[in-house]
Image (cartoon, rainbow, N blue to C red):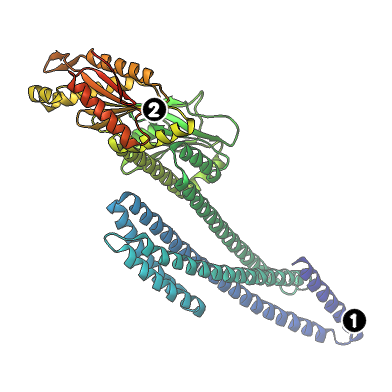
Amino acid sequence: MALAGKELTLKIAEGRNSCMEKKSATSNAPIKLILLAALGCFLFTVGGGFYLFRTTRDLEAAGKWVEHTQEVQLSIQSASSLIQSIDFENRLYRLTHNEDTLVLSQRNAIQLHTTIIHLRNLVSDNSGQLSNLDALDSCSLALSRAVGKTTPELAEATTPLLRCRQVLSVMANQERELLKERDELTRRRSQITAVTEAALATFCFLILIGLFALMLRDAILRNRMAQVADRTNQELNDSVQILKDHARDAQLLATARDDLQLCTDIQQVYRSAAFRFSELLPGTDGSLCIINSSRNMVENVASWSANQTGPRVTEIFPPDNCCGLRSGQLRWYGPGASQIHCDHFIGKPVERYLCLPLVAHGATLGILFVACPDETTQNIVEARMGGVRQLVQLTAMALASLQMRKKLEHQSVRDSLTGLFNRHFLEIALERELARAVRRKSSLAVLMIDIDHFKRLNDQFGHAAGDAVLKEVAKVFSSNIRTEDLACRYGGEEFTIILPDITPENALKRAQVIREAVASLRTELENDLYSSVTISIGGAIFPQDGQSSELLLRHADASLYRAKHEGRNRVVINVQSEVAATLS
């Protein structure tokens, strides 16, 4: 731009020198030269003004086309976000079978079709994009049919999702190229306009300062127009930067979503979420705080610090200490906002911070705390609140999903009444322990236990009393076995205990300890202490009594039958068809 201005100035100087030479050669006709100069200046001014008008109009038109391209890109990005939401909600429905998730997926599919119609109106002048829209419309209809079913199959939605993403990617690439071309055209026209304005202003100032005083006003007006153009360019640059920030946030959120889906335990979710929040909110300090299962304390489970100042929030605090948890919504503290401090700080509270509750399935799981060291950082956080809310939602959903998975896993292997492992887990665990015993060349004991006269107890006191006795007996088992031992409820009043890496003698002693502990049990039934609970125990030893789980359980059951036949309240261990028994 500076070089073009210099070239134009040199040309004007050369023209001026030529005019002066002609004036000296024709000194007899100064009036003619003045008139010619005036006419030339007039024509130059008129021509220059008309050229400026055209270039400014072209610049404004180019700016409108850039805005149009940006609007198309925003619509494409919106369609891509809807595709991602449909994919996430479809997978979430497969995991949770939540009908609300399915309805939300169907709504997003309808909104996607609406967005495609809007896109078609925007790119009606672009034949290349219209063909892409036809393909996008086709895969959108296929996707709507896939998610519109009552029980959608993930495989049916995967192909249209993939096709829609491919088409959107092609459209986005074409629009980026078109935006680049239009930006370049706008830049060139802006340069030409600025150079022309500077040259015309300089010419008018040097040559027409005495003859054309009114040109000063035109120069001022043109200068103002240049400022408007600069402001327009700055606004366009700001818009482009905002789009880049949105694209970066979208990429970060997509990466965070993928990371959270890969987490297999809650600690991984904590670490991953804290890292992604530190990336999304540079320059901030923050913590992820989770409410414990008792709902009476909040624990600081993960923190990040851009200023290396350490955690700002105490490790454990009551829920009432956080104003965000009390209000149940996002809360800012700072100039112009709430002036009531939270009470969960280490040391002096910071001057700018927010507390945002983590909510999933209608339940509050904890809060996100973010501290801003200055106003600039606070403005950055406020500008990215949309991404923050999405990442908070992803984190909350990941935590809720893991908690639900752990609950389901617990229910699948635990007996709901006694809390011991169930029979299904017993079969799996016994096979595993037998394989381990074979590798270690060690022995293993299996104890079959039955509560004596349990039917009579049920008939006398009722099933509620029977359940109470089962719970108390289960507690005795849990407190009288080793960490590596496994206590299971086999069914009804029968229990099984697996004792890995134990000798027959120690197995007999351990069974006797358990039998005596149950015999000394006192259970309160119908406002009275019931002390007549006894058990009979039958055992089998690997490898002497069998090489498979079926044989061991059969021999242990036979030993139990013998213990009950011989009078109950006793232990019988079967070892190589020789029976070792201890009476009560």
**Residue type at numbered disc 1:** Glu
Bin the neighbour count of mark 1 within 10 Å (Cα to Cα): few under 14, some 14-19, many 20 and up: few
Q: Are marks 1 and 2 in contact (CB under 8 Å)?
A: no
Q: Which residue lies at the image location 34% right of the left edge and 53% below the top edge? A: 94
Q: Which residue is outermost to the front?
A: 577
Q: Is 356 left or right of 32, judged from the image as shown?
A: left
Mark 2, residue position: 444
Give the Cα distance between marks 1 and 2.
Answer: 119 Å
Q: Which residue lies at the image location 56% right of the left edge and 37% below the top edge? A: 374
Residue 58 bears which disc, if any?
Answer: none
Residue 21 bears which disc, if any?
Answer: 1
Picture quarter with the C terminus: top left
Q: Nearer the viewer, mark 1 or mark 2?
A: 2
Q: Position of residue 338 (x, y in %)?
A: 42, 35
Q: Position of residue 495 (x, y in %)?
A: 26, 28
Bin the neighbour count of mark 2 within 10 Å (Cα to Cα): few under 14, some 14-19, many 20 and up: many
Q: Position of residue 272 (x, y in %)?
A: 50, 41
What secondary structure is found at the residue carrying circle 1? helix
Q: Where is 495 relative to 432, above or below? A: above
Q: Quadrant of residue 375?
A: top right
Q: Nearer the viewer, residue 314 or 448?
A: 448
Q: Nearer the viewer, residue 346 or 542?
A: 542
What secondary structure is found at the residue carrying circle 2? strand
User: Is residue 290 in view from this perspective?
Assistant: yes
**Residue type at numbered disc 2:** Leu
Q: Quadrant of residue 185?
A: bottom right
- N-terminal of the pair, mark 1 or mark 2, is 1
